[in-house]
Image (cartoon, grey):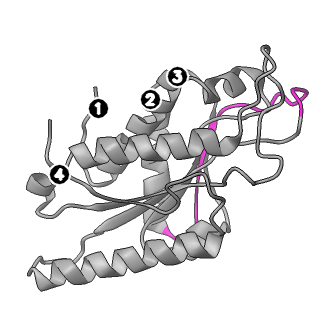
Amino acid sequence: MIDVKEILGFAPLLILDGGHGITTPERRTPPLGDGRVIQEYEFNKTVAALAELYASQLGFETYLTSPDETDTPLPERTEAANRVYREYRDQLQREGVDLSGKDIATFVSIHYNTLGSDYQTRASGVETFYYPTSSKGQRLATNLLDALLRGTSQRNRGVKSGNLYVLRTTEMPAALIEPGFMDYRPEAELMGNDAYREEVAKEIVEGVLQYYGIKHRIE
């Protein structure tokens, strides 16, 4: 197992944002074959918690913006992310770590796509987003998409720019991932698949490692 602190000379901070909560309206699958409905937060927050675990095992510092099922407002999530980032930056400076040219933190927001409220849509696949003027965010989003496409075979919808709140208001390189469509039945079923949740969590961490120039597959 690698240790990112040994490789980079500091422990990067990975901030994970599990988008939406239990009270978010309409963010759920249509009924599956067994009648079950999966809310988006169930996937997002489970994946965020798993990614935190895998990242911590590799030596990352981590922070979850919304660790429980609560629908935490966007400003609270990004303000907390920025506060934790600044506090960690100040801590490293006090410790004498040379931070010149280094990205000490990254921010990944986890979501699941939808276009409608039933299975009539045929939209499918994986895409990632970055803020239009952020070259570092674009690189992070590209690394994350590369990692996400190494696993379950899905359509590549590409890396896209978007004026999204969590990308616009965060102070560190940031990207948002959409690992599938909840109104496309095969990917709706993936939402509740434990193996897929673990896969996406590992791929998030692998994408962030790639951002830092580290090639490593999590077993």
The answer, for residue 133, to whether it is visible in the render is no
Up-down relation of residue 24 to residue 82 (above or below): above
* Boundaries of the magenta span: 118-134
Q: Give the residue type at disc 2.
A: Glu
Marks 3/4: CA distance? 26 Å
* Helix, strand or loop under label 4: helix
Question: What secondary structure is found at the residue carrying circle 3?
Answer: loop
The answer for how far apart the CA atoms under marks 1 and 3 are is: 15 Å
Snapshot quadrant of residue 218: top left
**Mark 3 touching mark 2, by CB under 8 A?**
yes
Judge left or right: residue 108 versus residue 35.
Answer: left
Q: Amino acid at mark 4?
A: Val
Query: Which of disc 4 and disc 1 is earlier in sequence?
Result: 4
Q: Nearer the viewer, mark 3 or mark 2?
A: 2
Which residue is identified by label 3?
152
Which residue in the structure is indicated by mark 1? 218
Mark 1: few, some, or many residues within 10 Å (few <14, many ≥20)? some
Q: Is residue 161 magenta?
A: no
Question: Looking at numbered disc 1 in the image, what kind of residue is underneath it?
Answer: Ile
Looking at the rendered image, the quarter that the C terminus falls into is: top left
